[in-house]
Image (tube, grey):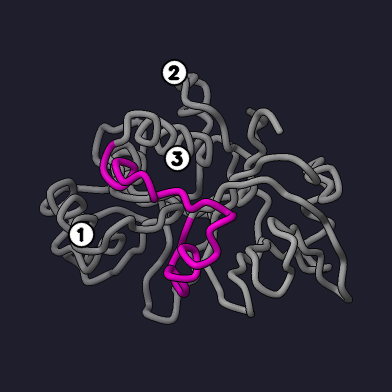
Amino acid sequence: MVSICGLMPVAALDPAIAAGCSLPPQGEGRVAAVIDARSFRLEDGREFRLAGIEPADQAKGAAALAAMVTGRQVSLHGEDDTPDRYGRQSALAFLTGADNPVQSELLRQGAALVSTDVAQRDCAAILTAAEAEARQAKRGAWADPTAIKNAESSGDILSGIGRFGVVEGKVLSVRQAGATTYLNFGRNWTRDFAATISRRIMPTIEAAGLSPKSLENRRIRIRGVIEGRGGPRIEVLRVGQIEVLGGN
């Protein structure tokens, strides 16, 4: 399997990777309450959202997060301290004395999926390795055989519109229409699943050594929010959304 931007097969994590996961500090505090499956409030009133993950199930994810962090001291580290529209800062959260973030344990339990919004390579490697471990062990969400959608099953993918999903299949063709490049997984371009790459993100994709045309006839795993534009679509906004799999 080819790793793209930190996506990698499960293996014993190199201690150097954990040591290399270093992001600017955003403060610390004791967790007073869990808001949802990836957000919590500190005793001082600040609210944080866990970067790098998407909940696999809101109720189960919130319960797992609450069991892990409620009443515990955490340190927060992030690439950007700008709050989102809800006033929450996005960060990796570390329990006191822990080498790996809270996110990695949620991923290891199968309570979350990697969202690829953490750009720092070593931090991203920790998260993707934890998810791969859960996926291979079929823990949590990965116990469901439909957790990874088949790119040939457009109807099944469309049932997840508006939600984060993971789709796997063979790219049958790569086409450009205007400012958009399409990775087509079916013959009917208006009905079958496709991934889209806008012209503005293409330099980032190519700088990572990933030419869209090279993906033709390759099996890939792609993750992101599922949209419905005739057929189901996932827009590629980051290189880490694409994982090239072994074999054709």
Seen from the viewer's position, the closer of residues 80 and 125 is 125
Above or below, comparing residue 122 to residue 192 in the picture:
above
Quadrant for the C terminus in the image: top right
Mark 3 — residue?
127
Image location (x, y in percent) of residue 212? 81, 51
The circle drawn on residue 12 is 2
Q: CA distance from mark 3 to mark 1?
A: 18 Å
Q: Secondary structure at mark 1?
A: helix
> Residue 1 versus residue 158: which sits nearer the camera?
158
Image quadrant in which the N terminus is located:
top right
| Residue 153 is a magenta residue | yes
Q: Position of residue 229 (x, y in %)?
A: 63, 79
Quadrant in the picture for residue 6: top right
Residue at screen point 77% across, 63% down = 182
Start and end of the magenta stretch? Answer: 139-165
Q: Which mark is residue 62?
A: 1
